[in-house]
Image: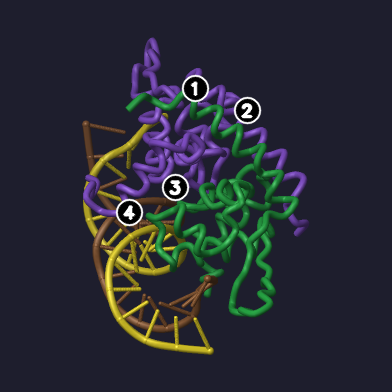
Chain colours: A green, B purple, C brown, D yellow
DNA sequence: CAGAATCCGATGCGATACTG
DNA sequence: CAGTATCGCATCGGATTCTG
């Protein structure tokens, strides 16, 4: 439920409408989104797998960010047919859009490697 | 004044420490930072100029984001010597790090151009 | 297995008014 | 000119508990 009337909202909206970079940025701005995308490319494509490899994330937030990534068309959630255990199992896969984000992530990473202050 | 004890904070910290991409992302994640960086490359390098070309931003937020960009070493703020009007005038210029961010911004923009749904 | 529900603290951004 | 101070609302992310 968004307050579509707030200046906050409309500012963001307008920004995304005429600045492609800002739009792209908004899709990957979430604490765990980059991590999730990376893990998906590694093949960790189920909810429980993601939880395992990203221990610090809570189920709530994982579900939240997966939902946003799906809504934004970066990933697809599909049900898995288990023959004898047809339970609620899903796999998350990257879409074409999601795969092409790799380029962006790479450039973020390259810049970070060059300029992140040593800790 | 940060609550360095919160999980929220430490999660972010650790993420930035071992994921270069997330670190880079954090530096440009602010509603107006991309816009500011772009305007700086165009030569709109003073506080009042930035206000003019980005009418929707408030002075508070402009000062805030300029401060963060400076703290992160992306821009430098330097005083200007007016001969007869040596008032408080400053120019903001991109550092080497800031200039090299252009590559990243370009890739964000390229992706956005290809994939942003038409409105 | 894959979440939904509820609660809450931390942060972000906008509005307005004031200042060296 | 270039901010700072105070306020208030909205969003984000974490903790915990419950469910089809």
Alpha-carbon span between mark 4 and mark 2: 30 Å
Q: Are marks 1 and 2 on the same chain?
A: no
Q: Residue furthest front?
A: A84
Q: Are marks 1 and 4 in contact (CB under 8 Å)?
A: no
Give x and y (percent) for residue A58: 40, 63
Q: Quadrant of the C terminus of chain B?
A: bottom right
**Mark 4 vs mark 2: in front:** 4
Give x and y (percent) for residue A34: 54, 47
Read off the chain for label 3. B
Q: Does label 4 or label 2 sit earlier along the sequence? A: 4
Q: Are marks 2 and 3 on the same chain?
A: yes
Judging by the rendered image, the residue that carries numbered circle 4 is: B8
Q: Quadrant of residue A104?
A: top right
Alpha-carbon span between mark 1 and mark 2: 13 Å
Helix, strand, or loop for circle 3?
A: loop
Alpha-carbon span between mark 1 and mark 3: 33 Å
Judging by the rendered image, the residue that carries numbered circle 3 is: B58
Q: Does label 4 or label 3 sit earlier along the sequence? A: 4
Near mark 3 (Cα within 10 A), the count class, few <14, some 14-19 or many ≥20, is few
**Mark 4 vs mark 3: in front:** 4
Near mark 1 (Cα within 10 A), the count class, few <14, some 14-19 or many ≥20, is few
Q: Are marks 1 and 3 on the same chain?
A: no
Helix, strand, or loop for circle 4?
A: helix
Which residue is at the front of the view, B62 or A45?
A: A45
Read off the chain for label 1. A
């Amino acid at each position: 439920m968004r307050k579509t009337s707030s200046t906050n909202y409309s500012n963001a909206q307008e920004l995304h409408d005429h600045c492609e970079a800002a739009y792209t940025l908004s899709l990957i701005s979430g604490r765990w989104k980059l991590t999730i995308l990376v893990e998906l490319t590694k093949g960790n494509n189920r909810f429980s797998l993601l939880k395992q490899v990203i221990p610090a994330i809570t189920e709530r937030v994982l579900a939240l960010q997966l939902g946003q990534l799906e809504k934004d068309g970066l990933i697809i959630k599909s049900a898995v047919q288990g023959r004898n255990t047809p339970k609620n199992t899903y796999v998350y896969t990257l879409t074409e859009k999601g795969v092409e984000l790799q380029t962006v992530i790479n450039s973020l990473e390259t810049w970070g490697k060059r300029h992140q202050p040593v800790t």
